Amino acid sequence: MSMKKRDIARATDPHREREASRYEHPIPSREFILQTLAEAGVPLTDEELARRLAIKPMERDAFVKRLGAMERDGQILRNRKGAILVASKLDLIKGRVEGHPDGYGFVIAEEGEDLYLGPHEMRKVLHGDRVMVRESGVDRRGRREGTIVEVIERANTQVVGRLVAERKFLFVQPAERRISQTILIAPEDVGNARAGQVVVAELTAQPDGHTQPIGRVVEVLGEAADSGIEIEIALRKHELPFKFSAQAEALAAKFPPVPRPGDLAGREDLRSLELVTIDGETARDFDDAVYCEKTGGGLLRAGRRRSRSGGARARQLGLLSPPRHSDASRAALERPVLAQRGSRPLVHGLRHGDRRQGRDRPLSLLSCGDALAR
């Protein structure tokens, strides 16, 4: 097509100037593509549409990307032969799938009222997928029912759940209860995971109404009864960030493994004390610690150090003194706890309680066996 004919073909594009201001080699606007499809009155193949819009070879890649974006946004659809048609001409409703543990679901429409999806339709999708649906009637409970015409965006690339083995079959039972389908796992795609463990499965095939979703195990989180496994599940289930960025890792790698002389300025050096943190393993900051040591006459002296960043000045206590309690609770709290590891006695630090919500509660238990045994 000559340059003159090409200019004539695009002369009626209502957003020609806008596209020219954005791109060095502008292509037809979304509005003009939809207008061209509507004027054609029939579905067009990519080649037919490109010919009508006078797309040059150097514009082909950008044109294909624009069609893909319009398809993801639900502006156009493809029929079974791959031809393109305008979604709005088909009275379709665009929305996001919200699943239910019982197998049915709903399409939360971007415009208009929501539609009910029966279990048969839900076998085509997973919770969170974006779809185009057509209203197909009313169910027996009077709810407007929909039929899925096109899945325009898949929301789940990975699913966290428990690996289950039944007979010769392996599958992942999703932790997200709104995903009612199980993820089939081939024996060669299990890796080192064992049945009963909590794993992350990467989806290699999405559901289509005829087959279940298929995946492969890419991460083992641990046993279902492990402490803290709920946190690991929640992080992945809700797609929360749990790894430091490459920039943060690189910055941390620049720090030396031991403090430099200048780092001690204005700080109290406590490295000679055998401090043990009383913060939990999953704590986000370690700002409170305790220690104990032998003194003359066989007495035990316990100490507590708290970081300035924790809001309190570093201090040392002669003994760990619990808050005011009843005589019975005070006696229990101040009683040292003894244990035995082989022939070496372990002396644990005093239990330190508080009176949160008006009740006595032990906070921590310090083991100083290694320090006292020497």
Image (cartoon, rainbow, N blue to C red):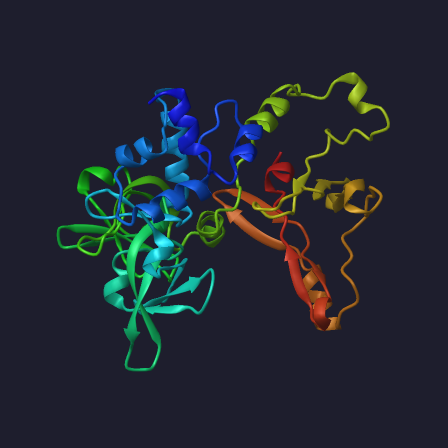
Residue at position x 66%, y 55% in the image: 336
Q: Is residue 372 left or right of residue 27?
A: right
Question: Which of the 4 image quadrants contains residue 113?
Answer: bottom left
The one nearer the camera, 32 or 114, is 32
Give residue 95's position: percent from left, percent from top: 41, 58
Give residue 268's position: percent from left, percent from top: 82, 31
The one nearer the camera, 7 or 193, is 7
Q: Is residue 247 above or below residue 232?
A: above
Q: Is residue 134 above or below residue 152?
A: below
Q: Can residue 301 be seen from the camera position used here?
A: yes
Residue at position x 78%, y 41% in the image: 309
The furthest residue to the left: 168
Residue at position x 62%, y 49% in the image: 348
Give residue 105's position: percent from left, percent from top: 35, 66
Question: Which of the 4 image quadrants contains residue 118?
Answer: bottom left
Q: Is residue 112 left or right of residue 310?
A: left
Residue at position x 66%, y 21% in the image: 255
The one nearer the camera, 97 or 367, is 97
Of the 4 image quadrants, the one containing the N terminus is top left
Give residue 305's position: percent from left, percent from top: 76, 42
Q: Is residue 89 left or right of residue 13?
A: left
Q: Can residue 154 be seen from the camera position used here?
A: no
Of the 4 image quadrants, the one containing the C terminus is top right
Q: Is residue 249 above or below residue 134?
A: above
Q: Is residue 79 above or below residue 256?
A: below
